[in-house]
Image (cartoon, rainbow, N blue to C red):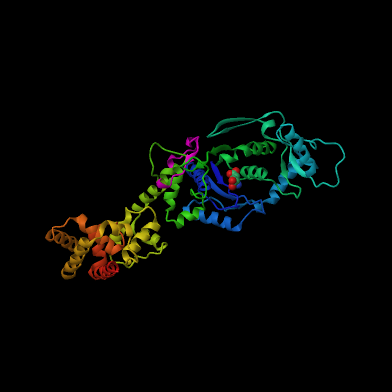
């Protein structure tokens, strides 16, 4: 059975790079009817934040990626790690190292001066001399000497690393007994039965150390997939400004979780030139062996486009519910279906959706300068005034009525749509963009149209 995991360190929020890694791991497990689990790597007690941890779990709930088991917390598993450290000591596969911090620093300094790679010199490996009484020891693993660590990475291909270049007898327990990062990752992946480790390529250098642990404990080595990073559009590391922010910020900005996941699956993986994937399709089609070998570029307009496609396909009831979270409750509005239809294909996010509808439902407090300069002059004011008079007398009722009367007005006054509609939009909504003008007129109704016109004419007179 394929078992994958996502293992964030809760030192910061979950951002989209992390969410993409989680998604890939999730899809691969689901595709194989396997399991996906969430493990919080909170062994660095000083740098952890409870808030970050809660936000990570909240983000998972929001996007709907569920994990098979309960959430694992490494901070609750210290006893397990201690047992394995003891086992390695008992089997003479690890040893106590009494090198003081100063001595270690001196060793490194000499290596640096000799232009060598800084590494521990195995002084206490098989040591038989006198043990210093004033140093609390760390525990170091006996790493293989002068050999190769080999593994196949599903994305990078065959890796063959010379131990003397990438390893030393690294520390597995600090002098206070707490286990180190690479040690606990290897122990957990093995004990939790993880078969496929999918993670960022920034972890590639940890893999050889983890393999040393696997081998020392006779654990099966999982398959590895190290995914290239996400860059910004300029090819640089993704920063906060580019979108490397808390995943929950995407919710606040009005993105749908399905759209965000769809966007992320395509950042680094493709299936022909298909852009839109339902969760079911992602599960069926995704394969980590097809992940791109080079970094991908984050692209906001792509995300906006995908989100707009998802918004368009949302059933009315879902849309009404979602808009409530953006301060818009249309449930008792008799024209709700028409209103939603009018804006559905004009917006990229739910936030924008709500803002646009608010602009329609509430009289404008200001009028766009540019629009006024372009479309308002003595002539257009005259046209607007006679239009309002005409509507005040005609008082249309149905949407069709509004359409017919509007056309009639244009015809009797020998006016083109382009002469009237932009100015009328400014009068009603504050700027010259809006969906179909007759629908806008119908939704507002004649009384509101007249009220808004009075406000506009007063504004223009001053
Ligand atoms: N805890 C690591 C991180 O947040 C991930 C470890 C792993 O995936 O092996 O970057």
Give the quarter of the figure containing the N terminus.
Answer: top right
- Residue 290 among those drawn in magenta: yes
Q: What stretch of residues is rendered in magenta? A: 283-301
Q: Number of labelled discs? A: 0
Residue 385 appears at what percent x and percent y? 20, 66
Can residue 166 be seen here? The reply is yes
Give the quarter of the figure containing the C terminus.
Answer: bottom left
Quarter-wise, where is residue 266 in the image?
Answer: top left
Residue 388 appears at what percent x and percent y? 20, 67
Residue 274 appears at what percent x and percent y? 38, 40
Question: Ligand 1, what quadrant?
Answer: top right
Query: Residue at 42% of width from left, 62% of height from top?
Result: 325
Residue 20 appears at what percent x and percent y? 50, 45
Foreground pick, 142 / 299:
299
Q: In the picture provided, is 180 more to the left or to the right than 331? A: right
Foreground pick, 123 / 419:
419
In the depicted structure, whether residue 245 falls above or below residue 409: above
- Residue 219 among those drawn in magenta: no
In the depicted structure, whether residue 159 falls above or below residue 259: above
Foreground pick, 165 / 190:
165
Q: Which residue lies furthest to the right in this view?
A: 130
Q: In the picture provided, is 113 more to the left or to the right than 129? A: left
Query: Residue at 72% of width from left, 48% of height from top?
Result: 82
Q: In the picture provided, is 446 more to the left or to the right than 208? A: left
Can residue 195 be seen here? The reply is no
């Amino acid at each position: 059975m394929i078992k994958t995991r996502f293992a964030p360190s809760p030192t910061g929020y979950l951002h989209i790079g992390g969410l993409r890694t989680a998604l890939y791991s999730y899809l691969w497990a689901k595709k194989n009817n396997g399991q996906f689990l969430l493990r919080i790597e909170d062994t660095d007690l000083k740098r952890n934040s409870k808030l970050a941890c809660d936000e990570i779990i909240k983000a998972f709930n929001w996007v709907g990626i569920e994990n098979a088991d309960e959430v694992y917390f490494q901070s609750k598993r210290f006893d397990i790690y201690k047992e394995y450290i003891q086992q390695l000591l008992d089997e003479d596969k690890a040893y106590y190292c009494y090198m003081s911090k100063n001595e270690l620093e001196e060793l490194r300094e000499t290596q640096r001066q000799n232009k060598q790679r800084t590494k521990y010199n195995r002084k206490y490996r098989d040591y038989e001399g006198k043990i210093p009484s004033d140093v609390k020891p760390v525990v170091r693993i006996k790493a293989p000497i002068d050999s190769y660590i080999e593994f196949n990475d599903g994305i990078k291909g065959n890796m063959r690393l010379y131990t003397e270049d990438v390893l030393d007898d690294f520390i597995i327990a600090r002098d206070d007994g707490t286990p180190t990062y690479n040690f606990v990752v290897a122990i957990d992946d093995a004990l939790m039965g993880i078969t496929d480790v999918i993670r960022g390529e920034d972890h590639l250098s940890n893999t050889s150390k983890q393999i040393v642990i696997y081998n020392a404990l006779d654990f099966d080595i999982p398959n590895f997939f190290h995914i290239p990073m996400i860059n910004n559009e300029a090819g640089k590391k993704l920063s906060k400004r580019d979108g490397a922010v808390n995943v929950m910020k995407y919710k606040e900005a009005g993105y749908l979780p399905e759209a965000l996941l769809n966007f992320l699956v395509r950042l680094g993986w493709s299936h022909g030139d298909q852009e839109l994937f339902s969760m079911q399709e992602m599960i069926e089609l995704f394969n980590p062996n097809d992940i791109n070998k080079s970094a991908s570029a984050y692209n906001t307009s792509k995300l906006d486009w995908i989100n707009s496609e998802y918004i368009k396909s949302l059933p009315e009831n879902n849309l009404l519910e979602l808009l409530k979270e953006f301060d818009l409750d249309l449930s008792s509005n008799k024209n709700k279906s028409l209103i939603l239809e009018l804006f559905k294909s004009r917006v990229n996010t739910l936030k924008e959706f709500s803002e646009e509808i608010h602009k329609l439902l509430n009289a404008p407090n200001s009028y766009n300068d540019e629009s006024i300069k372009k479309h308002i002059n003595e002539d257009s004011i005259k046209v607007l005034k006679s239009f309002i008079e005409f509507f005040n007398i005609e008082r249309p009722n149905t949407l069709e009525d509004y359409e017919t009367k509007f056309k009639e007005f244009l015809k009797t006054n020998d006016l083109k749509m382009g002469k009237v509609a932009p100015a009328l939009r400014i009068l009603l909504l504050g700027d010259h963009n809006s969906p179909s003008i007759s629908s806008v007129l119908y939704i507002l109704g004649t009384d509101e149209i007249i009220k808004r016109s009075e406000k506009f004419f007063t504004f223009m007179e001053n």
